[in-house]
Image (cartoon, grey):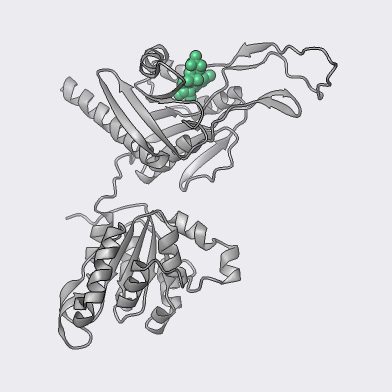
Amino acid sequence: MNAPSSNQRILVGVSGGIAAYKAVVLVRRLIEAGCEVRVVMTEAATRFVAPLTFQAVSGHPVRTTLLDAEAESGMDHIALARWADAVVVAPASADLMARLANGLADDLLTTLCLATDAPVHLAPAMNRQMWAHPATQANHARLIEHGVTLLGPAAGAQACGETGEGRMLEPDAIVDALLANDQQDLAGRHVVVTAAGTREPIDPVRFIANRSSGRMGFALADDAARRGAVVTLVAGPSTLPTPARVERIDVETAQQMQTAVESIGVTDIFVGAAAVADFRLAAPVDHKLKKSGETLSLELVPNPDIIRGVAERSGRPFVIGFAAETDHVREYAAAKRVAKGMDLICANEVGPGKGFDRPDNALLLLWEGGERELAQADKRHLAGEIFDTYHQITQDRDDASS
Ligand code: CTP
C-alpha cells in the first residue's frame, strides 16, 4: 500500500500517558504525509514528553495552557479550533475521555475539542482494567454518540506489564485511519471562484450593492483547496477570512472582477458564486452628491457578464454557476444555465430568511440530462456536494464518450 498523502491541517492533542512518546512518531508521520501539524498538550502530558520535542518535530510552538496571553495574541484558541481540518488526540487517557464525554472545557485541549467543527478522533491508551471499567465504556459510548471517532485501542502487551485491550494504536495505523477518507480528487486542477457581491460606486461615499455575504463562494474555494486544487478566489468586498491555501484577489466592481478573472487565464473549473451587479452607473460622480429636494435619477448601464465570457472562451473550463431566484426556480435556472453556457447551475430560492447572508441554504443542481436536490444544509457541506456532482458529471461524460 502506498503511503497516504494529504495537505490537511491536523491538530494533534496529547494527553498524559506513557504512550505520549509514540505521539512524537505520529506527528512525524503526519508531516511526512504532507500534513501541517500543530500540537496541544495537557499539563499531564508534559510530564511524559517535553513540549520542546513536539516543537522540534512539528516545526511550531506547542500550546499547553488555555489562558496564555502571549500565545492567544498569536493564533487564539478559537482560531486554532477553526484552523484544524481534523483533531486527533493520541494518546487519549481515561481522564481525557471522561472530561470530553461530559463536555468539560477545563483545559486548552478539551476546549479545542468542543470549539472545533472539524472531526475529532481519539486514540485511547490506558491500562486494560481502566479501559474495561464501566465508567470508561459509558464515556466511550457517549463520545461516539457525540460524533467522535474512536481509533483503537489495540490489544497486546502494556507498559504496566499486563496484557490486554488498552494499547494505543500504532502511529502508522492512526495516520492511515485519519487520511483514509482524505479526497485529493481535485489535485492538479486550477479552480477559480468568484465570490461575494460587487459594489458599483455612485459617488465617493455611496454604492450599489446586494445582500451576498460571500459564504458560498468562500466555502467552495476552501473545499476545492482541501481536495488538492490550486485555487484562486476573486472576491468582492467581504469580511470573511481567506481560506487556507487559497490565493485571493480582492476586487470591488464587476468590471474589476472581470479583469481579474481574465488575467488568470486557463483554468480547469470556473465557479461563478459572486452576486455580480447587473448594472453600474453610466458615469459615477466624483464628488458627494447633494440633495436638492428634487427627485434624483441615476443612469445605469449593463455590466459585463463574467460567467458568460468564461463559457465563451476557447478551451473553456468546466463552468459552474448560480441562480438566485424568488420564484419559478427550476424553470428560470434551467433557462439561465443554457443561456449562459454553464455546465452546472446551482439554483436557490432567495427572499426573506432564504439564501443570502445565511450560513445554510438549499440548492437545486441542474445539468444537461440530470438534476439533484440538496436539502437545507451548511454552505460548507453544500460546497462538497457541488464538487462531488462535478465529478459525477465528468465521469458520466467520460463513460458516454468511451
Ligand atoms: N454572473 C456573472 N456576471 C454577471 C452577472 C451574473 O458572472 N454580470 C453570474 C453569477 O456569478 C451567477 C450567474 O451569473 O453564477 C447568475 O447570476 P444572476 O444574477 O442570478 O443571473 P442574471 O444573469 O443576472 O439574471 P437575472 O438577474 O435576470 O435573474
Is 319 located above or below residue 31 in the figure? above
Is 116 located above or below residue 341 in the figure? below
In the rendered image, which quarter is residue 220 located in?
Answer: top left
- Where residue 376 appears, x then y in whole percent? 37, 35
> What is the quadrant of the N terminus in the image?
bottom left
> What is the quadrant of the C terminus in the image?
top left
In the rendered image, which quarter is residue 121 located in?
Answer: bottom left
Residue that lies at the very extreme toward the bottom in this rendered image: 161
- Where residue 178 appears, x then y in whole percent? 28, 58
- Where residue 395 appears, x then y in whole percent? 22, 29
Is 84 located above or below residue 358 in the figure? below
Nearer to the camera, 251 or 371: 371
Q: Residue at x 45, y 32 (%)?
A: 192
- Where residue 83 appears, x then y in whole percent? 46, 55
Q: Count the marks: how many?
A: 0
In the rendered image, which quarter is residue 136 located in?
Answer: bottom left
Nearer to the camera, 40 or 327: 327
- Residue 401, can we see it? yes
Q: Residue at x 20, y 54 (%)?
A: 2
